[in-house]
Amino acid sequence: MNKFKKKCKKIFAFLKKEPVRIALGLLFFLPGFILEKCELTVLSRILCLIALVIAGLPVLVEAIKGIFHGELLDETFLMSIASIGAIVLGEYTEAAAVMIFYLVGEYFEHRAVRRSRGAIKSLMDIRPDEATVLRGGREERVDAEEVEVGESILIRSGERVPIDCVILSGNADLDTSALTGESVPRAVRPGDPLDSGAVVLSGVLTCKTLRPADESAAARILELVENANERKSKEENFITKFSRVYTPSVVVGALLVAILPPIFGWTEWSEAIYRALVFLVVSCPCALVISVPLAFFGGIGCAASRGILYKGGNTFSAIAHAKTFAFDKTGTLTTGRFAVSGVYPVGMDEKELLALAASAEYVSLHPIALCIKQAAGEVARPDESREVPGKGSIATVAGRQIAVGNRALMRQIGAQIRGEHTADAGIVYLADGSEYLGCIAVSDEIKPEAKAAIAQLRQLGAEKTVILSGDRKENVERVKKAVGLDAAEAELLPNEKYERLERLIAEGNGKTVYVGDGINDAPSLARADVGVAMGAIGSDSAIEAADIVIMSDRLDKLPEAIRVARKTLRIAKENIVFALAVKIGVLILGALGIANMWLAVFADVGVAVIAVLNAMRAMRIKKAG
Amino acid sequence: MKFKFNVTGLDCPNCAAKLAARMEKLDGVDSAKINFLAEKLTVESELPEEKLLVALQEIADDFEDGIKILK
């Protein structure tokens, strides 16, 4: 007996599945539909009723459940009323069609949602659940969350870094694309810190964990992206509000359409009620309610996969309309590392001067000397070389007596400096005997992509690009010129930076973006319409205050962020306009008696499916070629 | 206390909002929010976690078949 019960339960559960109900419903409905055309009315009605019960009974049950919870205008309830109403009017085929196609639509809608959810999940699948820990000399596979700070873990090639850690031994190539959107692998060696989420491409690493798993980079990124959904965009808020009034209004409209025309004697009661049922079928705002947030979620996911973290959907529209861009200098426009920024020879070419300086400083470990040697490439060994403490070096290079160092050294050997040059880090002068040869300027290195990124911003509609810096005027001007910005303000105190930004916000049309990385940038990042922080070099407080975080610190991610935002907004707006236009169109046609229930069902579920498919495009926004 | 659960089996954002509204009516629950796309349920409540989980699952079962709330 019990076995029989179990079997019944199993069959019942099987029959409750959407595809099964759709298939069985269609099996009865199609002959019913054909028979109706052959005017075999009774047989057709019986078949349609069976189809309606198979497809619609669970819907009706849910509708009744909903009523007990005080949800009167539930979708299931409205659909139930529509098909019961159709039967009362003697429209058996349409009654069955409403239910069956409602189910078909739901089915496709759910599939589309599941698929896009899956796609977003795999995009975000950067956090490994397990780690290999070395405990008492043995490898143990454990939950990443159970690993304590300071334990040793083993990461093999092909694996993701499970927890933020520092390399104890081993060399490897690292793919950080999931974190930074950078596809070029990075070589790492003992002593280098690793962020969780990066993939080890080759090599085996033994590392010491720095943080618990849930505070590691991958977890923080996921947290940020998941919470991003809570800061809603204008469009999403509009949809939420709209859906609250939409369904009740359409139901009221249905009542009016059902009652008023017959009272005035314009139409028959049965015709009026049929038109009202058409209203009920299109009364669900589902297409909008699902597809607009899905577009934003897709856009956020798409940006995240390229190393651009949006903290909320509300930022999309602000950055899409940005006209003014203010930048911090060090760490934002520049890398914060020193490099040769200018070579000014007298009577020889730049390469020669660099080679000479590099040779003369062959033994020096001074940071500036290291920069010059790096810029020179291959360095010829000098015949003899000695350092002059606090001043520079004097060396014999190919028989010449080369002095390389600061002004004091030049004075000491009696060389006359010609020309005026400036640099952030310092200037190195060269002399052969007492004959002046020229100088080399070493400065904070400008990011190689900076100039192109600013040009792209202009193409995207930037009207004003400004550098706001606390650094000396000459240095700021140099960066401004090299990058191609419109204006530069130098020697600003942190509070002055903030004031200048406020002035830019007041003066500019459109929205103002501030891009920075330091602790002192945090107030400006929070004050700007859009704050963009550099994620790698940036301080925690800057990342905290910003609306967007660029994980790789690359400036060309900024125009990319704008493009993703604009495309996402367009998709969201397309969905709003498309869904509303179709629904309102069907409502008008329905009120006039032109639209039938078939069309109404399409307007309800067809639009939802199309809108969801459109929203999924936001996940696949292409990179600019 | 703020609790975060995974919630699976929800197929429509409208339903997610309704389910969250019902959970909010539960005694001892201050707020309940469902992030439909991320499938996350965030609940603020004074109840102990295990008890809360059972109560929430009960509400979900009553609401629709096939919804699972997991730690």
Image (cartoon, coloured by chain):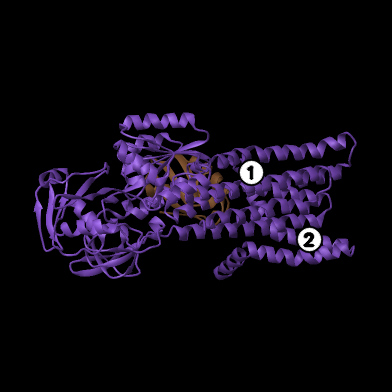
Chain colours: A purple, B brown
The residue closer to the viewer here, A13 or A258, is A258
Give how far across and how far down residue A141 sits, in percent.
Answer: 29, 67
A106 up-or-down from A520: above or below: below
Residue that label 2 marks: A48
Tell me which amino acid carries mark 1.
Ile
Give how far across and how far down residue A457 sits, in percent.
Answer: 48, 46
Q: Does the residue at mark 1 contact the one at mark 2 (Cβ under 8 Å)? A: no
Helix, strand or loop for disc 1: helix
- Identity of the residue drawn at 54% across and 45% down: B17
Label 1 marks a residue whose chain is: A
B43 up-or-down from B9: above or below: above
Q: Which part of the image, by quadrant, shows the N terminus of chain A?
A: bottom right
The residue closer to the viewer here, A433 or A394, is A433
- Identity of the residue drawn at 64% across and 43% down: A67
Mark 2, residues whose alpha carbon is within 10 Å: few (<14), some, or many (≥20)? many
| Disc number placed over residue A67 in the picture, else none | 1
Marks 1 and 2, the one that precedes in the sequence: 2
The residue closer to the viewer here, A498 or A104, is A498
Residue B25 in view here: no
- Identity of the residue drawn at 38% across and 46% down: A482
Helix, strand or loop for disc 2: helix
Give how far across and how far down residue B43 sits, in percent.
Answer: 43, 44
